Image (cartoon, rainbow, N blue to C red):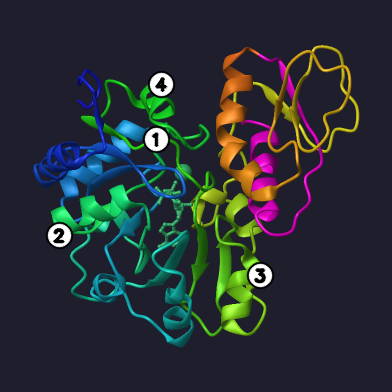
Amino acid sequence: MTVGLTTRVLAADAAGIDVAARTLHDGGLLAFPTETVYGLGADATNGVAVARLFAAKGRPSFNPLIAHVCELADARALAQFNDDAIRLSQFWPGPLTLVLPRLPGCPVADLATAGLDTIAVRVPSHPVAQALLTKLQRPIVAPSANRSGHVSPTAAAHVLSDLSGRIDLILDGGTTPIGVESTIVACIGPQPLLLRAGGLPRSDVETALGHALGQHETTAVESGEAPLAPGMLSSHYAPRSSVRLNATRIEPGEALLAFGPPLPHAERVLNLSPGGDLVEAAANLFSHLRALDAAGAKAIAVMPIPSHGLGEAINDRLARAAAPRD
Ligand code: TXA
Ligand code: MG
């Protein structure tokens, strides 16, 4: 039913944001920029809208969504904050998602949290996301605005190529500044757990907490048990081309995703960051993967990328892109 819509693209100015808020209020679906990646938003309190969102994404319905809110006070109406969660809320607004126990009166549709008794909440800093949330005065659930299994969109054109005809509206707010999804930390037990490396480096989180983060055991995810962060399923970020990591030379016919000074002899090269800057590399990651994929590269060789700072999230996404498909 969502297929066959005419997808409008509007500039993310005051008029566009007005239309967008009305669209969400009326149960529609729209893509909007956040500081991390574009989100595909629906009114979190409208179960039918959330169901349409799953259909538009082609997402397995067990995969719960992040509820985006304006500020900490709004998040506290949805979820239970322990001391660690309060401490980590210093990073809001920003690229951090907290998974917390869901409060009994939480108005978010059960479908959005896949029936779990926890909820993922985030306060985005992007001015367009903030303006939309302020206007709507309700939480917005928003997965990344790509078809399930594709890489996350960092520009309106990426959203259009994945979701045209399946959603009502795209608010074009330019390229998203961070370029990888939010860091996800669960504060539901005695020790906070890192569920997904992302736009906020682990070291910032650990400094704020005063101790190391626990690491979620991903084997439970792969063994098909109820996943704690199902986005961690190994082949989640798959481009069509095959991806080869830590390349130190180019094989015939391979395109190169470079970092720093590029390897010689590649026919087609895109550089994540010629100067070796991980922040710049994160911002370029998904658009460069998409571009090499769209150019029909049979295989993409990726140069080694250091794993500190945003490098942890970059290497995580690349490992998923390189994972064998089912
Ligand atoms: O940067 C971001 O986080 C973007 C922007 C749009 O905010 N959103 C995003 O959403 O990446 P999505 O749906 O693509 O990824 C959210 C991840 C999924 O892996 C999901 O399984 C996990 O969060 N998640 C959501 N609720 C959860 C919960 N209650 N417990 C554990 N994991 C949860
Ligand atoms: Mg996603």
Disc 3 residue crowd, few under 14, some 14–19, many 20+, Cα 10 Å: some
User: For residue 117, which quarter of the picture?
Assistant: bottom left
Q: Mark 1 points at which residue?
A: 174
Residue type beneath disc 1: Gly
Tag 1–tag 4 contact (CB < 8 Å): no
Q: Mark 4 points at which residue?
A: 161
Q: Which of marks 4 and 3 is in front?
A: 3
Q: Which of marks 2 and 3 is nearer the N terminus?
A: 2
Examine the structure image and report whether residue 299 is included in the region drawn in magenta. yes
Q: Name the residue under label 2.
A: 137
Q: Earlier in the sequence, mark 4 or mark 3?
A: 4
Residue 195 image point, x, y percent: 56, 62
Give the residue at x 56% y 25%: 290
Give the residue at x 28% y 55%: 130
- Where is 121 relative to 223, above or below? below
What residue span does the magenta drawing correspond to?
297-326
Give the residue at x 63% y 66%: 202
Q: Name the residue under label 3.
A: 203
Distance from the alpha carbon under mark 4 to that under mark 3: 35 Å
Residue 322 image point, x, y percent: 70, 34
Q: Is mark 1 on a helix, strand or loop?
A: loop
